[in-house]
Amino acid sequence: MPELLVATTNPGKLREYQEIFAGLPFHLTTLTEQGIDLEVEETGATFTDNALLKAHAYAQTSGLLTLADDSGLEIDALGGEPGVHSARWPTPATSYAERFKIIFARLAGLPPEQRGARFRCVIALARPDGWATTVEGVVEGRIADAPRGTHGFGYDPIFLYPELGRTTAELPPEEKHRISHRGRAARAAREVLVRLIEGNQYQ
Ligand code: ITT
């Protein structure tokens, strides 16, 4: 079976890709399994730039077809922040509990319609020969009044999905993947991967 390197250092993301891509005709391999301990600096201005930076760098290093994503939370009332800075906002060392407090303080008193936010995920697929493509997924929601739920990772406890009246941390994995930015992007990526397999173009 051909190999696909899921190039993320984030255990939450890795778990989600393993769940979403179950049944794909690729063996999913990881940075740990490949013994790769390369840190790619995310210097791009957009999710797409950063996803491509990571996918190209890890494809070159591993010699494998590689998937990388750049994803994050855009909060309308904060002008789209934390956005591409989500993993290191306001500093890399800030805990999520502290990040939630900062966000709640800055959104204090805003009515639900002004608490709009979205998760965005750009997946880049890159081959060692330099070929690459990207797909994107978005989920629209709102910032909750308080953190809720224990599933997922990162900002999930404060991201309310209004259609279900629950945060994405209150949704079991399959339910999150059905509506999430990563689930949507991954389903588009799955189609690209199937075409690569059919055309024998995955190396
Ligand atoms: P890699 O670059 O190694 O993949 P990372 O965590 O640094 O790991 P990003 O730069 O793409 O990845 O940052 C994504 C951040 O956005 C992530 O750390 C979370 O804070 C947030 N995020 C992304 N998807 C999320 C999700 O499904 N649920 C909650 N938070 C999410």
Image: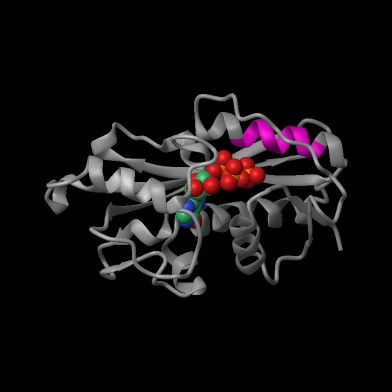
Residue placed at 73% from the left, 35% from the top? 39
Instruction: Point out residue 190 in the picture as x, y percentages from the top left corner.
Output: 63, 57
Residue sitting nearer the eye, 2 or 73:
73
Q: Does the segment drawn in magenta span residue 56?
A: yes
Q: Is residue 70 visible?
A: no
Q: Quadrant of the C terminus?
A: top right
Residue placed at 71% from the left, 66% from the top? 24
Residue sitting nearer the eye, 163 or 172:
172
The colour scheme applied to this rendered structure is: one colour
Q: Is residue 61 above or below residue 100?
A: above
The magenta span reads: 51-59
Residue sitting nearer the eye, 148 or 132:
148
Residue placed at 77% from the left, 38% from the top? 58
Instruction: Point out residue 2 in the picture as x, y percentages from the top left corner.
Output: 85, 58
Instruction: Point out residue 151 in the picture as x, y percentages from the top left corner.
Output: 48, 69
Q: Does the segment drawn in magenta span residue 178?
A: no
Instruction: Point out residue 77 in the picture as x, y percentages from the top left corner.
Output: 23, 38
Q: Is residue 89 left or right of residue 34?
A: left
- All told, the count of numbered labels is 0
Instruction: Decide whether the magenta segment is chiefly helix, strand or loop.
Output: helix
Q: Is residue 166 above or below residue 77?
A: below
Q: Is residue 91 visible?
A: yes
Residue 13 lies in quadrant: bottom right
Q: Is residue 188 left or right of residue 106?
A: right
